[in-house]
Amino acid sequence: MTALLPILDSHFPFDPMLLPAVRQAPAEAARLLGAPELPGEISLPVWCYLTLAGEALGLVDTGSGALFGEADGRLEARLLREGVSPDQIRRVWLTHLHGDHCGGLVRRDGEPVFPNARIAVPAREVEFWLDRAHEDTAADIARDARAALRPYGGRLDHVSPGDIVDGAEAIAAPGHTPGHLAWRLPAQNALAAGDILHVPALQLAHLDWSSDWDWDAALATQSRKALIDAARTEGQSLLTGHGGVFSPACLSHIPRSERA
């Protein structure tokens, strides 16, 4: 296989009005989306990344699996199409515990999709979603995260920023969720940044445009700017959960004033 292979897990509908700035400037958002008027919804892809963990195979995030319905969770089938059996995956690096990133760890019957893998999970995510009581608005996230992690038992590695796990370095990227991590992949010359953005056409033009889905909009903006700047400065590809891969050349077109 190539050193890095993006794999499309699924799509889901997204209302652009979930960005507060879009509610304030719908005409600007429509222009950036190349539409005569703001669409009621756009389709967001869910990306996972197959790569090497030392001499073995690893994945950054796992898509939604069975959590979001029959039409979702195509990661396993698409791995098989690439000639990769799930039991060959030895490492999974999670960016955060939203269901469209961790749901692909588990089958509908509760069995693990990756029976030989160890799972690197952000310790702060576990603390926030699983180890604390939450209001009803977060209950579904906690439920899905528990279901995804449960079959891995003693194969969960709780990690913090600065930890290095099978060659990947955990980078703090809070904001979208409290414990959101990015993963620096030196062997692949890439920075896997998870959900630092949702709609690239809008948020790469205006890096301060965050989403209602962000736990802390100011922190999310700070992380977005820092990771884009880091990838560009270090000449790395930026891997995102919903925007795909952005090359350093692509990132170089973002004005410096937007990243300051």
Image (cartoon, rainbow, N blue to C red):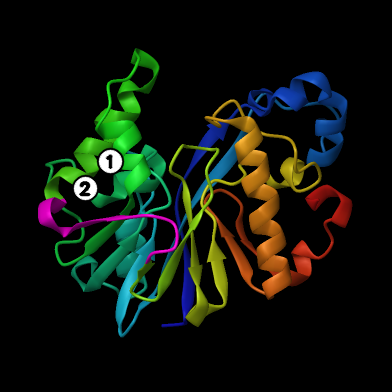
Q: Position of residue 83 (x, y in %)?
A: 31, 76
Mark 2 — residue? 106
At label 2, the amino acid type is: Val
Numbered disc in front, either 2 or 1: 2
Mark 1 falls on what kind of element?
loop
Query: What residue is drawn where x is 54% and y is 56%?
Result: 193
Left or right: 196, with 52 as reference point: right
**Nearer the observer, 47 or 229:** 229
**Nearer the observer, 69 or 32:** 32
Mark 1 — residue? 66
Left or right: 170, with 199 as reference point: left
Q: Position of residue 237 (x, y in %)?
A: 63, 69
Pointer 2 or 1: first along the chain = 1
Quadrant containing the N terminus is bottom left
Numbered label attached to residue 163: none
The magenta stretch is 152-163
Q: Position of residue 157 (x, y in %)?
A: 24, 58
